[in-house]
Amino acid sequence: MHKIDVENTGPHEYGVTVNQDGTTTKHHIRVPQRLLDDLAVTEDNEERLVQESFVFLLEREPATSILREFDLDVISRYFPEYGTEIRSRL
C-alpha cells in the first residue's frame, strides 16, 4: 500500500512524498509547459497530473526506484505508454 502527498512548491514545481510499506521517499518534480500542452492539461489540473503520474510509476516500480528529482516528461523515456495511460486517468 502507498500514500502520495503532493505539495506545490513554486510555478510548475512540486514536492512529492511517498510512503510505501513503511519507507518514505521525497521527490522534487517539475512539470514542463510543453507536457501540459501535449496532454491538454490546464494548470488547475496540474497537481492531479503529478499525483496520477506517481500512481502510474508505483504500479511499475517501488518508490525507492523513482528518481529523486526530474521533469515529469522524462517518464515517457522509461515507460513509452505513459502519455496514453495518463490521458485516460485525467
Image: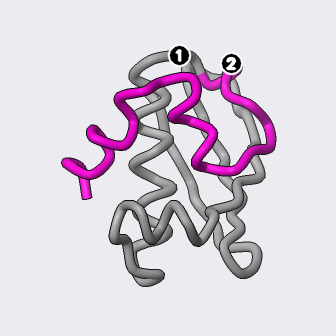
Q: Amino acid at mark 1?
A: Glu
Magenta stretch: helix, strand or loop mostly: helix
Q: Amino acid at mark 2?
A: Ser
Indicate the quadrant where residue 65 lies.
top right
Percent x, y of residue 42: 39, 80
Indicate the quadrant where residue 39 lies.
bottom left
Tag on residue 65? 2
Circle 2 SS class: helix
**Residue 68 is covered by the magenta coloring:** yes
- Total marks placed: 2
Residue at 55% in and 19% down: 21
Residue at 48% in and 30% down: 57
Q: Is residue 74 above or below residue 38?
A: above
Q: Is residue 13 above or below residue 66?
A: below
- Rendered-image quadrant of the N terminus: top left
Question: Label 1: which residue?
Answer: 61
Q: Is residue 30 above or below residue 2?
A: below
- Range of the magenta residues? 63-90
Q: Are marks 1 and 2 in contact (CB under 8 Å)?
A: yes
Q: Is residue 42 above or below residue 20?
A: below
Percent x, y of residue 40: 33, 70
**Could you classify mark 2 by the number of other residues whose Cα lies within 10 Å: few (under 14), some (14-19), or many (20 or more)?**
few
Whole-Å distance between the Cαs marked 1 and 2?
6 Å
Q: Is residue 19 left or right of residue 42?
A: right
